[in-house]
Amino acid sequence: MKLKSFAKLGVFVAALAAVIIIPITAIAGYEPANRPTKTYTGPESEAFQYPVFNSWVNTPYYGDERAFFDAATQTNGQYQDKLAVTPGQEVTLRMYIHNGAAPGLNGTNFDGPGVARNTRLQVFLPTATSTQLRSFGYIVADNTNPGWVADSIDFNSSVPVSMEFVKGSARLANRANPNGVALPDTIVNNDTQFNVNRPGAPVGYQNMDGNFPGCFEYDAFVTLKVKINGPALSVQKKVTTPGSTNWQENLDVNMNDSNSTPTTSWLIEYKNTGTATATNAVIRDSLPANLKLVPGSVTFFDGNNPNGSPVADDGLFKGGVGLGNVLPGSNGFFRFRTTVATPFTPQECGVKPLVNTAEAEATGVAKVNDTASVTTKKDANCATPPAPPTPPAPTPSVVPSTPVSATLPQTGVEAGLLGVIGSSAMAIGAIKYRQSKKAVAETLKKKSNR
């Protein structure tokens, strides 16, 4: 019987994750590795004469069907057999399903010998917390040969992570259900080993009844989502007076008595707020100047030390105290006392804050910190500040005189021309005067000669 040609599925290629809780040393890849296969060479390729899942290679649409289980993150969208993940991501796991039997064996109403019966899926998610996790997906049926096929996905992280199934996310998409149909949450299993007798999630073509016909036109994608969970640390810092349980962010301390050394109590609480174990966790504290540790006052409290356990004086403040592995939801406390050495000179007054910082970190977990403070105040026995110098008497301002005329003097060619005209007039007048005087003299002379 020959294969029918097939068109590309017009469905979303989402993800399904099958994670088996098998140690990471288990063999990765598809199983059974030695099962018979068919190589696709075209629409006339000879098909299997019995129901069998994912045993074709070189198919134009999917390639090697034996590697049918892969995953992708939202950031890159590329499905892979090995995937790097980080805490907080949501990963889509994808399972491709194809019964390689010849289509002529399906029968009139999918009642023929080529239809896989009681077809169901099992997905194994690891319960471990690790930097390396492996997931397995299984396709199981009652009458296929072999009775089950499997494939794996490896997940790698720089920090220990765990995987959590997003309930209600499993769906199957095929040509009869292009928008997808929901599959039950029983698809996911967290057992320590594969169990062929588990019910899993039934799948089919038109209905999810376990009847899965042969041929490419009936293939499907099953997808589900998992969340990558990792560790997350928080730290809180508080302060109060010794004997009080009124822990505060800030404490006011009066420093009017220069000989006093008030005592303060400090509290550090850490907690793993994530969903995976924080490994190699460390807590440290940084004391500012003018805060001096009371020797022997550092005490550690947690679930194993409800009454407190003493800590070396330099442990918390020089490099920090190692906590080892902190389980999700676990917390603990450090408590210690300090004396406040006056930050003021004998004559100085005012307000000065002293800030104390606590830090928490773990392998692959970003450092977090929190602060609390002591605000020192001094308003007595202050030196009298010198009187400010007497300012000099102000110099009287000079009132400018008002000009007689605001008319600007004439300058330039016009002024020169007027000067020339004036001088010429004076010269002409002198000449006229001399001429007149000479005329008078000549007249008088004529008269005298008569």
Image (spheres, helix red, strand yellow):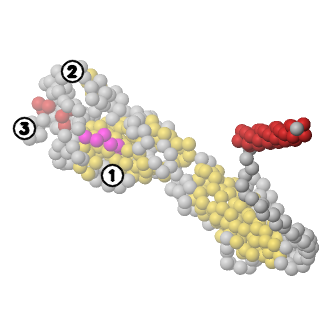
> Which of the two marks, 3 or 2, is nearer to us in this view?
2
| Residue 354 locus on image (x, y percent) | 77, 66
| Residue 378 locus on image (x, y percent) | 83, 76
Q: Tell me which amino acid carries mark 3.
A: Thr
Which residue in the protein does label 2 denote? 42
Question: Helix or strand or loop: what does disc 1 sit on?
Answer: loop
Q: Magenta span covers which residues?
A: 11-16
- Up/down of 10 relative to 1, above or below: below
Which residue in the protein does label 3 denote? 108
Q: Tell me which amino acid carries mark 2.
A: Gly
Magenta segment main secondary structure = loop
Question: Helix or strand or loop: what does disc 3 sit on?
Answer: loop
Is 15 covered by the magenta stretch?
yes
Which residue in the protein does label 1 denote? 169
- Residue at point 8% right, 41% down? 109
- Res. 295 visible in picture: no
Q: CA distance from mark 3 to mark 2?
A: 25 Å
| Residue 82 locus on image (x, y percent) | 45, 36
The reply to whether dot 1 and dot 2 touch (C-beta < 8 Å) is: no
Q: Tell me which amino acid carries mark 1.
A: Ser
Q: Quadrant of residue 175?
A: top left
